[in-house]
Image (cartoon, rainbow, N blue to C red):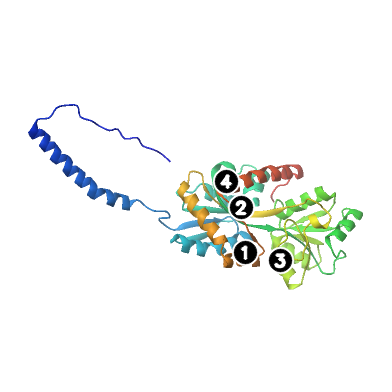
């Protein structure tokens, strides 16, 4: 916020009566004009938002990030009184979309929706990323978080995650675990799990969750760590051995990895809104307030939980702090495992 200091002008010269009268009348006329113009000038100041907002999704339609964008865009538009246009700009592990968000005009009308893969993993796993999430964005608000589901076929030898741990430790290199690709959250989770539990599991990366899911259903891999299997778990076509962070409402009886033999283990993902650095503080405050209000609504929370998400509200400062913590933790994991994108 800028403050402009005006200079008060005080005349020191003397006035004769006629001149004083003329100047007094002129001053009165000027004051009247100012009084007439001032309300018009103030009313002409644009309120926020003054036009449609663009919500950039750095992933293709149909994925978790896009689902979140669709859940929030309509009620957010209603709250703001302006359209919220979802724009999918996929590619390069989220880098294309987040680059567009970082380079947008910083007027509060462009918002990026990112998760840890888009904002944190790409920073470490890809060379020459054209933006720095810590410097080129201002945090607005978190939206939701999710545990990743560890799934297998109902006929898999292990009936629980604890049984799987025993089998994996007794048979290093035997079991194959699929993920949506190198550098994805599923891949990072697998690497973290192997390090925490002392496992040797073969990583099978795919180009997306769908082909990985197909191969699991076909029996070509033993496990899958990816959110794409949630609907198959709910329908009974697949079995969930564990979830990687907190228990999720749609699978209340599925234990966490920490509850199943790896104490203290927690690895999840979360999503949040960001604006280009330099965006008006008023815009950040307004969007944060509206998101918090929406997350308090029962219908929004139900939509999130039905999709496997847990509502996750925060202040801008809390979101920025969470991202910094993730940079440090995931950065160490990416470097140690030498993870790169395909």
Q: How far apart are marks 2 and 4 (CA)?
A: 23 Å
Q: Is label 3 or label 2 in front? A: 3
- Distance from disc 1 to disc 3, alpha carbons, whole Å, reads 13 Å
Image quarter of the N terminus? top left
Residue 230's disc number? 3
Q: In the rendered view, would you say 314 is above or below 69?
A: above
For discs 2 and 4, the disc positioned in front in the rendered view: 4
Q: How crowded is mark 3: few (under 14 residues within 10 Å), some or many (20 or more)?
A: many
- Residue 89, given in percent of the width and then of the height, sits at 56, 56
Residue 313 visible, this angle: yes
Foreground: disc 4 or disc 3: 4
Mark 4, secondary structure of its residue: helix
Examine the image and state in which quarter residue 80 appears. bottom left
Residue designated by label 2 = 94
Labels 2 and 4: the sequence-earlier one: 2
Tell me where residue 246 appears, x and y as whole percent. Answer: 72, 57
Residue 317's disc is: 4
Q: CA gap, disc 1 to disc 4?
A: 23 Å
Counting residues from the start of the chain, the first of labels 1 and 3 encountered is 3
Q: Which residue is drawn at 39% across and 53% down?
A: 47
Residue sitting at 31 percent across and 35 percent down? 6
Find the distance from the CA under tag 1 to the CA under tag 2.
Answer: 22 Å
| Residue farthest toward the left in the current orientation of the protein | 18
């Amino acid at each position: 916020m800028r403050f402009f200091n005006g200079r008060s002008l005080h005349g020191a010269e003397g006035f004769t009566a006629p001149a004083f009268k003329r100047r007094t009348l002129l001053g009165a006329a000027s004051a009247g004009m100012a009084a007439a113009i001032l309300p018009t000038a103030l009313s002409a100041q644009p309120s926020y938002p003054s036009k449609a907002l663009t919500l950039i999704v750095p992933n293709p339609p149909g994925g978790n990030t896009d689902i979140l964008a669709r859940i929030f865009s309509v009620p957010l538009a209603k709250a703001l009184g302006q359209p919220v246009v979802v724009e999918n700009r996929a590619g390069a592990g989220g880098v294309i979309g987040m680059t567009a968000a970082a380079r947008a005009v910083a007027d509060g009308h462009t918002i990026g929706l990112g998760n840890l893969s888009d904002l944190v993993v790409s920073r470490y796993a890809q060379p020459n990323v054209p933006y720095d999430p810590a410097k080129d964005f201002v945090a607005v608000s978190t939206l939701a978080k999710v545990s990743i589901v560890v799934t297998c076929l109902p006929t898999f030898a292990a009936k629980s995650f604890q049984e799987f741990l025993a089998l994996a430790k007794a048979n290093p290199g035997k079991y194959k675990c699929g993920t949506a690709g190198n550098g994805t959250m599923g891949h990072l989770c697998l690497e973290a799990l192997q390090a925490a539990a002392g496992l040797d599991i073969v990583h099978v990366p795919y180009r997306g969750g769908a082909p990985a899911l197909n191969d699991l259903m076909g029996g070509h891999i033993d496990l899958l760590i990816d959110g794409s299997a949630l609907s198959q778990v709910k329908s009974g076509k697949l079995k969930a051995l564990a979830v990687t962070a907190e228990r999720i409402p749609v699978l209340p009886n599925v234990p966490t990895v920490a509850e199943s033999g790896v104490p203290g283990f927690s690895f999840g993902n979360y999503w949040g809104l960001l604006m280009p650095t330099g965006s008006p503080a008023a815009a950040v405050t307004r969007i944060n307030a509206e998101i918090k209000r929406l997350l308090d609504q029962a219908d929004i929370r139900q939509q999130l939980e039905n999709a496997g998400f847990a509502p996750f509200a925060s202040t801008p400062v809390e979101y920025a702090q969470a991202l910094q913590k993730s940079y440090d933790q995931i950065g160490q994991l990416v470097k140690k495992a030498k993870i790169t994108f395909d």
